[in-house]
Structures are given as structure tokens and as C-alpha cells.
Amino acid sequence: AFQVTNVKVSDLYTSGTYTIGASTPWSVSAVSTTPLEFGNAVYAEGATSITNGQTATSNYARTFLPATYGDTNKFTVTFTAYMLYKGQNLGSKNYTIEAKHTFEPSRAYNFVIELGAGDEIKFKVEDVNGWGEIPDIDIP
């Protein structure tokens, strides 16, 4: 089983301008190096960890400025994963993932952690229920 802690997202746009009536109303400017902290992952049904094939979510959804992150302006997701066996910590690993994605206006996003085979951990961005559904987006 795994515990995922200290989830942070950095290199995000933290200021932007909305121009009423413009064909592209949102423009973004300043990028912050101060991470947006999501805390520890939350597991399904009161569990204290996750195993392969299960998912966990960030503590809460956060709203991102509408912006497109690509090959030259990626944002960064960092977290620590602890491997547990019968409640005992067998070791940990720090992860840093550079990601690109287009955050759309009028949507709130939540980070979902999905364990893959072996050492692989993936992050996906999903809409929060009630804010509009879109297909799963793998990051990176």
C-alpha cells in the first residue's frame, strides 16, 4: 500500500486579466514559484492508504486561472510517496513531474493520484462534479 503526502503544484500563473467583449477574454502574466499546497492525498472510504488499481484525490479542489501550459511553460507537481507493508513504512520517494495542460475558464480542477504498475505513479486532472464533465487527462 502507499501513502501520498505533501502534494504541491508550482510554476502556475497567479495573475491575469479578463477583458469583457474580447475574442480571447483571458490573458495571464505572472508565474509564481510559490507552490499551491494540496496537502496529503485523501483515500476512498476512510482508508489510510491506496494500493494498485485504486485512486486517491487531493484534499480539495482548487481553481486555476484559464491558461495553456505547453512544452516551454510547464507547471510542476511534487509529492512524496511512502510504501507501507502492514502499516510499517518500508521507504519513501519524492516525485517531481513537469506537466502541460490547458485549464479552461469556468471550471475547477482536482488532482487525482493513480498508482500504476511498479514504481509508476500518474497524476490526472479531472473536473469536480457539478462543474462539467470532460474525459480523463493524463499529466504529463
Image (tube, grey):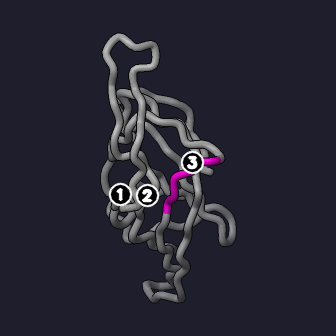
- Residue that label 1 marks: 36
Of labels 1 and 3, earlier in sequence is 1
- Residue that label 3 marks: 73
At label 2, which amino acid type do we have? Val
Q: Residue at left 49%, top 79%?
A: 82
Residue 9 circle label? 2
Residue 111 circle label? none
Secondary structure of the residue carrying numbered label 3:
loop
Of labels 3 and 2, earlier in sequence is 2
* Residue 112 belongs to magenta span: no
Find out whether the residues at labels 2 and 1 contact each other: C-beta distance under 8 Å: yes
* Residue 76 belongs to magenta span: yes
Q: Nearer the viewer, mark 1 or mark 3?
A: 3
Q: Identify which residue, 3 or 53, lies in the foreground.
A: 3
Q: Residue at left 49%, top 66%?
A: 78
Secondary structure of the residue carrying numbered label 1:
strand
In the image, residue 85 sits, relative to residue 103, either above or below, namely below
In percent of width and height, residue 104 lies at 45, 30
Label 1 neighbour load within 10 Å: few <14, some 14-19, many 20+? some
Q: Is residue 110 visible?
A: no
Cα separation, mark 1 vs mark 3, equals 17 Å
Cα separation, mark 3 vs mark 2, equals 14 Å
At label 3, which amino acid type do we have? Asn
In the image, residue 140 sits, relative to residue 63, either above or below, namely below
Q: Residue at left 35%, top 46%?
A: 14
Secondary structure of the residue carrying numbered label 2:
strand
**Residues shaded magenta:** 72-77
In percent of width and height, residue 11 lies at 46, 55
In percent of width and height, residue 118 lies at 68, 71
Q: Identify which residue, 76 or 28, lies in the foreground.
A: 28
